[in-house]
Amino acid sequence: MPQIPRAGPVPLTVVGAPELAARLGVSAGAPPAGSASGRRVVVVGGPVAERMTHAARAVGEGAHVFLLWPPGTAAGADALAGRAEEAGVEVGLARPLGARALAGVPDGWAARLVTLTLVARTGGTLAGAGWPGLLAGAVDLCSTLADARDASRLDAVAERDGDAIRAVALAGRFENGAYAQAVVRFSDHAPADEVALYAARPGSRVEARSLDGPLCVETQASTWRVPVPSGDPLADEVAAFVEAVGAGRPPAYGLGAALTALRLVARVRDQLR
């Protein structure tokens, strides 16, 4: 279990996610008003339609905010980003499919090619994310590894069983020239969820066969595997955010990156209609 500051410079409150609060060992419910600017972190979950309201209130009171995925609409996230900038606070988010598959990527590393396959076994962990979470997660992983903020071209094709989508293939050229392909599908026959992540740039590559790791990083000089973290993945993301704001650093995953995923997913869904 990560060590979460419960008092001192960055106290923590969880709103709308009592199970997460229990796992973190912190208070749940409406955050107390009147704290000094930058002196606390509010983790916001609960109904998606209410998350931006809770987040805006906390930002207005001078708190840093960590939003569970999904945060809501792109328009709401964009408005919240403006309020946070005015208030001088940080807003971080949980990644759609978690952060562990990216934990060992070197700082500043940007792929020129990304390929990703996600096979969600019916009834498995990935299937629990549903199509919104799976598409957002695929787009997030590809755009993050490519260090991209927009796509100059994005194509999406779906295979359906009646009205139900069973598989989606994505291909995109990002504005920085990087290229990505992703296939996301459901399976009634796969014995377990399947993940195949590959990203490359001249002289180095990263690969993963699970969203929980290990991540294999290969360069011309060496190859190493990033150890698989133990403990609660979401709690680790919260702890990393608390540590970052306590140290005065921007979060690893903020509203800018989340807006990239939300906008690209909206483009994908438009093509799939």
Image: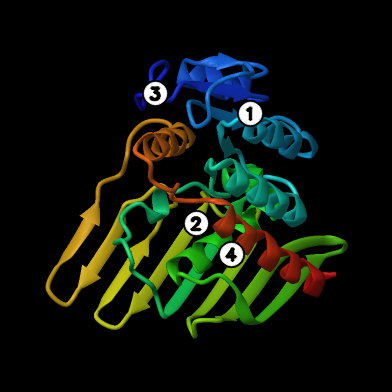
The image shows residue 140 at horizontal and vertical percentages of 55, 60
First of labels 3, 4 by sequence position: 3
First of labels 2, 3 by sequence position: 3
For mark 3, give the secondary structure.
loop
User: Comparing marks 2 and 4, which lies closer to the viewer?
Assistant: 4
Amino acid at the residue labelled 1? Glu
Amino acid at the residue labelled 3? Pro
User: Comparing marks 4 and 1, which lies closer to the viewer?
Assistant: 1
First of labels 1, 3 by sequence position: 3
Q: CA distance from mark 2 to mark 4?
A: 17 Å
Pointer 1 residue = 61
Please give the name of the residue rendered at 60% of the width and 39% of the height, measured from the top-left corner: 67
Quadrant of the rendering where the N terminus is positioned: top left
First of labels 2, 4 by sequence position: 4
Q: Are marks 2 and 4 in contact (CB under 8 Å)?
A: no
Q: CA distance from mark 3 to mark 4?
A: 35 Å
Pointer 4 residue = 139
Q: Which mark is residue 194?
A: 2
First of labels 2, 1 by sequence position: 1
The image shows residue 240 at horizontal and vertical percentages of 39, 38
Residue 133 visible? The answer is: yes
Mark 4: few/some/many CA within 10 Å (<14, 14-19, 20+): many
Question: Which of the 4 image quadrants contains residue 236?
Answer: top left
